Amino acid sequence: MTSVGPMRTLDIPRFHAMKKILKDMSVSFLTGICFAAGVALVMFLYGAIELGPFDEYEYHVSQPKEVSVSRHSLVADRRVLTIDGEIRNDASFEWKGVWLQANVFVDSTLMNSCIEIVEDVPAKSNSSFEIACESTAGSHLPDNFRYEVRVTDGYR
């Protein structure tokens, strides 16, 4: 031990051990930061390659007037409330996705709202859909039950 000032002693081996621990902690911290940056870079590059460049003609339309629900009916004897039907695309272009919403009512009270996305809806054609309302039973429906289906959004 070496004496440093009055009544203070410095334990050289412990000093070097603490210095090594701090150095190792700093290296581990920097390694972790570099690893996290590398993972973030890989995720960014994967997203850029997988998604590709954004097409300037792709866009979202709220309540597209070219798409309508042409037919719908309640599917009987299912575990959950299920509605099937068709949508009609009267546009001269394909929709990449069309969002449908089924609202379930008892009397005039909204009990549930269910969403379904129909993908790749060709121009001037009909496409089938099936909406399953997971939190609504499909049997023993009350007499004052009713539902409505509407097109809410489209993406092309």
Image: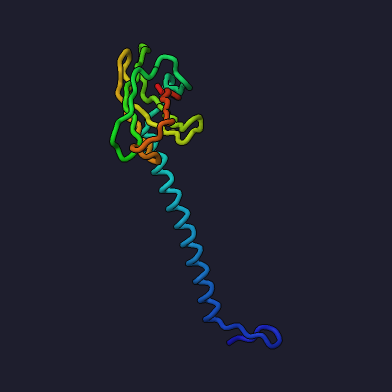
Q: Quadrant of the N terminus?
A: bottom right
Picture coordinates of residue 112, whole percent (x, y) = 45, 36
Picture coordinates of residue 26, whole percent (x, y) = 51, 63
Picture coordinates of residue 106, whole percent (x, y) = 46, 33
Q: How many numbered dots are placed on residues in this image? A: 0
Quadrant for residue 74, please give it.
top left
Quadrant for residue 115, please give it.
top left
Q: Quadrant of the C terminus?
A: top left
Q: Residue at x 55, y 81 (%)?
A: 12
Quadrant for residue 118, please give it.
top left
Q: Nearer the viewer, residue 110 or 139?
A: 139
Q: Nearer the viewer, residue 98 or 80?
A: 80
Picture coordinates of residue 72, whole percent (x, y) = 34, 23
- The chosen color scheme is rainbow
Which residue ends up furthest to the front in the rendered image?
143
Q: Residue at x 45, y 57 (%)?
A: 32
Q: Nearer the viewer, residue 138 or 29?
A: 138
Q: Residue at x 53, y 74 (%)?
A: 18
Q: Nearer the viewer, residue 57 or 142?
A: 142
Q: Residue at x 48, y 30 (%)?
A: 107
Q: Is residue 56 above or below residue 13?
A: above
